[in-house]
Image (spheres, helix red, strand yellow):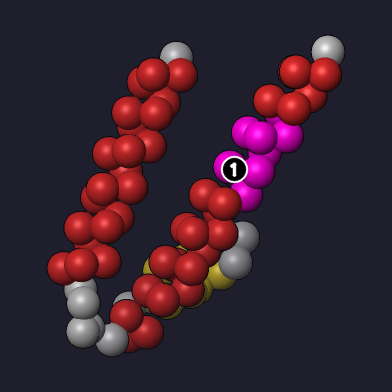
Amino acid sequence: MDSIAALTALEKSRLALRDLVTAYDGVNLGAFTHPHPVLGVIDGYQWIAFLGWHEARHTLQIREAGEQLSAS
């Protein structure tokens, strides 16, 4: 997958997540659980927090890679 396709897929995924969160506004997301392969069973609130953290970590990794490439 090239960078344009990756960015397009990421944007599509983020819009779908935003739509999901908006659709469930006012619903107790703690009542919904789903297993994570490493963290075990987590609820809807934990999933949303995890996804935010996960994207933030990837953003940092991309910046670190860019800095390393610029330094070479």
Decide if residue 62 is on the left or right side of residue 42. right
Total numbered labels placed on residues in the image? 1
Span highlighted in magenta in the image: 57-65
* Residue lying at 52% horizontally and 64% vertically, measured from the top left: 50
* Residue lying at 47% horizontally and 58% vertically, measured from the top left: 51
Residue 34 x/y as whole percent: 40, 69
Q: Main secondary structure of the magenta part?
A: helix
The quarter of the rendered structure image containing the C terminus is top right
Residue 43 x/y as whole percent: 42, 77
Residue 5 x/y as whole percent: 36, 20
33 in magenta: no
The answer to which quarter of the image holds residue 70 is: top right
Task: Say which amino acid is labelled 1.
Answer: His
The answer to which quarter of the image holds residue 62 is: top right
58 in magenta: yes
In the image, farthest residue toward the right: 72
- 72 in relation to 44, above or below: above
Q: Which residue is mark 1?
A: 58
Q: Observer-nearest residue: 29 or 7?
A: 7
- 39 in relation to 25, above or below: above
The quarter of the rendered structure image containing the N terminus is top left
* Residue lying at 52% horizontally and 49% vertically, measured from the top left: 55
* Residue lying at 66% horizontally and 35% vertically, measured from the top left: 63
Decide if residue 40 is on the left or right side of residue 18. right
Residue 26 x/y as whole percent: 21, 84
Q: Observer-nearest residue: 47 or 34?
A: 47
SS at circle 1: helix
- 71 in relation to 16, above or below: above
Binning the other alpha carbons within 10 Å of mark 1 as few (below 14), some (14 to 19) or many (20 upward) gives few
